[in-house]
Amino acid sequence: MKAEMTSFVTSSEEETERVAMDIAEKLQPGSVLALYGEMGAGKTAFARGVVRALCPECLPLVHSPTFAIVNEYAGKNVTVYHFDFYRIEGDDDLYSTGFYEYRDAGGILLTEWSENVPEAIPEDAVRVTIEKISMTERRILIC
Ligand SMILES: Nc1ncnc2c1ncn2[C@@H]1O[C@H](COP(=O)(O)OP(=O)(O)O)[C@@H](O)[C@H]1O
Ligand SMILES: [Mg+2]
């Protein structure tokens, strides 16, 4: 059973990346890490931390995949798929992104704008919600 919720307050983008790096080490192949939070919350920064941990040689290329929908980062042991569902509409759209295939193939899936695809986020996903407290502070809830 998954029980506890963890929360952090970070004071910079770098700190948010470091929190993400720690979480990344615990992700199993096939994991979905669902990011929630408004524009500018730090979802892409968090995703960058995950990639930094799992595919250091992929940096500094991590940016928001809003136009591509998915960016792929092939690490030594695992491939990270970074999705942005800002523009997604419906299940057909979602299917065509490869979301389900990548998951079945054992990739690690990061999803920005998870709010837009509630049906795609599995029960056992790691949910990361980022709230703006101030210009530089963010509350990160992980459950
Ligand atoms: N504590 C923090 N954690 C993450 N980002 C921060 C923080 N403080 C300020 N920022 C800034 O907020 C912005 C977050 O952008 P981004 O990660 O692209 O957000 P999103 O993907 O949620 O739209 C960046 O400009 C970043 O420098
Ligand atoms: Mg983003």
Image (tube, rainbow, N blue to C red):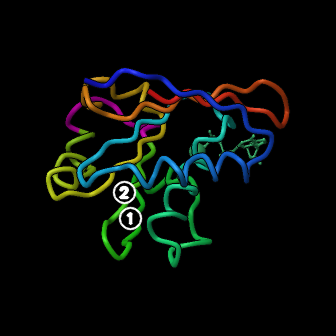
Local secondary structure at mark 2:
strand
Q: Residue 94: which quarter of the image? A: top left
Q: Is residue 142 above or below residue 84?
A: above
Q: Are marks 2 and 1 in contact (CB under 8 Å)?
A: yes
Q: Dot 2: few (<14), some (14–19), or many (≥20) neighbours within 10 Å?
A: many
Figure label count:
2
Which residue lies most toward the right here?
135
Instruction: Name the residue located 59 percent from the left edge and 27 percent from the top edge.
Output: 7
Q: Looking at the rendered structure, which numbered label has been put on residue 72? A: 1
Q: Which residues are magenta?
A: 85-92
Q: Looking at the rendered structure, which numbered label has been put on residue 81? A: 2
Give the quarter the ligand 2 occupies.
top right
Q: Is residue 88 magenta?
A: yes
Quadrant for the N terminus in the image: top left
Q: Is residue 78 above or below residue 117?
A: below
Residue type, label 2: Tyr
Front residue (pair 123, 71)? 123
Q: Dot 1: few (<14), some (14–19), or many (≥20) neighbours within 10 Å?
A: some
Lateral position of residue 26 relative to residue 136, left or right: left
Of mark 2 and mark 1, the one earlier in the sequence is: 1
Residue 73 location in percent, x, y?
41, 68
Residue type, label 1: Glu
Lateral position of residue 87 relative to residue 118, left or right: right
Quadrant for the C terminus in the image: top left
Q: Looking at the rendered structure, which numbered label has been put on residue 109? A: none
Q: Is residue 137 magenta?
A: no
Instruction: Name the residue located 41 percent from the left edge and 42 percent from the top edge.
Output: 111
